[in-house]
Amino acid sequence: MNPHRHFLLFKPWGYHSQFILAGNKKKLLLGSLHDFPDGTMSIGRLDKPSEGLLLLTTDGKMSEKVRSKKVEKEYFVQVDGEITEEALEQLRNGVDIMVEKEIYRTRPSKAFRIMPTPTLPLRGKPIRDDRHGPSTWVSITIIEGKNRQIRKMTAAVGFPTLRLVRYRIGDLTISDLQAGEVRELDLNDYFQ
């Protein structure tokens, strides 16, 4: 029997992908969403303004499996402006971004425009509306996870990110979850 526990979470906007923060600041942390067991850690991170699928585990080896380059991570990204096919092609081929003060070339990715607009829960803080210009939803699938990578990639091709939602990790999605919802599951069924 496996003593470890695993969770699927739709991280809401404004939450930190942590359970403890240094200092005395009032921050929205994952532990306020559910009664997680001691030793629970997030597998990868989503920054405070990002939303979507976050997997949690008490098993460090499972964390390594999920973060590996064998597992795809798909993001739904609302970008500023009407994205061009040229920009999508650049995202597919890899772009130069700054990682730890050095230029890093991203690995090839899958990138395409999402039509119609994906159905997602409302965000905790509204996105600007169409009076401020058009926006486009795109899907970007990567196999790596550098700090703020998707935001840096869309900015590098001239279409800054307005909203970022991780939709899928491997075969797991947030398709039937609401923001803040947590489900316990056995990740061994999904990641070998």
Image (spheres, rainbow, N blue to C red):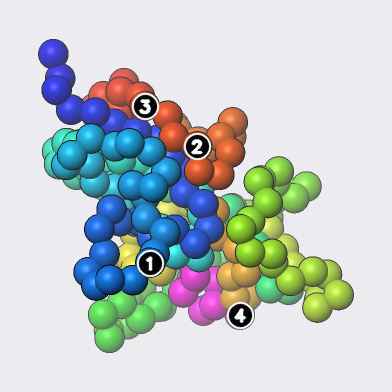
Q: Is residue 82 visible?
A: no
Give the distance between the C-alpha atoms of the residues marked 3 and 2, in whole angstroms. Answer: 10 Å
Q: In the figure, residue 94 lies in which quadrant?
A: bottom left
Q: Amino acid at mark 2?
A: Glu
Q: CA distance from mark 4 to mark 3?
A: 39 Å
Measuring from the top left, give residue 92's x and y in whole percent.
Answer: 51, 61
Which residues fall within the magenta stretch? 149-158
Q: Which residue is mark 2?
A: 181
Say which residue label 1 marks. 26
Secondary element type, mark 1: loop
**Residue sitting at x 86%, y 75%:** 131
Q: Amino acid at mark 3?
A: Glu
Horizontal side of residue 118 vs 75, given as left or right: right
Indicate the quadrant where residue 134 lies: bottom right
Residue at position x 30%, y 23% from top?
A: 186
The tag on residue 184 is 3
Q: What x and y, as percent, mark residue 64? A: 19, 44
Q: CA distance from mark 1 to mark 4?
A: 35 Å
- For the point 33% across and 65% down, which residue is it? 146
Query: Which residue is nearer to you in this view: 119 or 34?
Result: 34
Q: Amino acid at mark 4?
A: Gly
Viewed as shown, does residue 62 lie left or right of 83? left
**Label pair 1/3, CB-CB below 8 angstroms:** no
Residue 153 falls within the magenta-colored stretch: yes
Q: Does 112 lie within the magenta span?
A: no
Amino acid carrying mark 1 in the image: Lys
Image depth: mark 1 or mark 3 in front:
1
Q: Which numbered dot is residue 158?
A: 4
